[in-house]
Image (cartoon, helix red, strand yellow):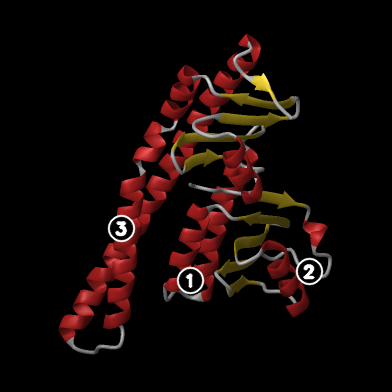
Amino acid sequence: MTIGVFVLVAATAFASDTSNKDSYVFRDGGITWMIGQGMSADALQRIQSQYGNSFLWARRNGQIFVTREQFVLDSASIIVARRDSGEERQARFAEITDAAMRRSSRPRGSYVLTTEINRATISGGMSIENVVYLRNKYHGQFLWVRTKEGTWLIDDADYLDRATAFFAEERALGPEQRAASEEESQLDREEERLEDRRDAASRKRLEEVRSRQREVSHRERELDDRQEALEKIAEEKLWALIDDAIRRGVARPVR
């Protein structure tokens, strides 16, 4: 199951940190990385206790943003594993945060679309606990939707097939994205092995590796941009389908 949770709150949520400079807290299984401006130990402890063991917290352009979206966390893991300078690392965190914030601002509401066993497509505004609750409550395939007007459930096979098809192109990017990520990790490991060597052959290979890293990073950005564009198109179609299902009575209201 792919799970993404987005939280966007006012920048006054942590009043003790009044700086407008960017700061990032990435927590992965109990290990915490602090990137950017930083904060007091008390503020850091509050954030960790509030959001648990896996999240990315960001103070970006005066706004506070938190995500547990797995794709973002995977990207953050790759960033902290690299031997970038502080400025380069912060720039990379700014990039993935901006993309996540754009995705979180688009949806008209929240939805859970199950496509097959143990898989789901989830929009912003859903906690992990709520997703698990819905999957336990509604077995099989379903599309659960919440908007400001109410909450609905769609389990009509035709509507579910059409909804799932909207995301086919986006899901098809998965293997290429994973391959690029794996290649980047391999290059990073090779770079680390070569950096302490002084022979000519090693220095030449290091230049080749770094050139290839730039190419892979460029390809990853292109894939991310393409995924974002496809996701936007898919969600526009999905919400039109949801409106049609509600209008025709195919979507039944639930509490």
Q: Residue at x 78, y 69 (%)?
A: 17
Q: Could you say where residue 87 lies in the image, as x and y percent from the top left?
A: 53, 71
Image position of 214 with respect to 175: above or below: below
Q: Could you say where residue 86 lies in the image, as x and y percent from the top left?
A: 53, 75
Query: Which is closer to the viewer, label 3 or label 1?
Result: 1
Q: Secondary structure at mark 2?
A: loop
Classify the position of the C terminus by image quarter.
Answer: top right
Give whichever of discs 3 and 2 has the lower sequence position.
2
Image position of 194 with respect to 35: above or below: below
Q: How many marks?
A: 3
Residue 17 is tagged as 2
Q: CA distance from mark 3 to mark 1?
A: 19 Å
Q: CA distance from mark 1 to mark 2?
A: 23 Å
Name the one closer to the observer, 46 or 222.
46
Tell me if mark 1 has few (under 14), some (14-19) or many (20+) residues whose alpha carbon lies within 10 angstroms of its own: some
Query: Which is closer to the viewer, label 3 or label 2?
Result: 2
Q: Is residue 165 something one can see in this rendering? A: yes
Give whichever of discs 3 and 1 has the lower sequence position.
1
Left or right: 127 in relation to 179: right
Q: Secondary structure at mark 1?
A: helix
The type of residue carrying mark 2 is Asp
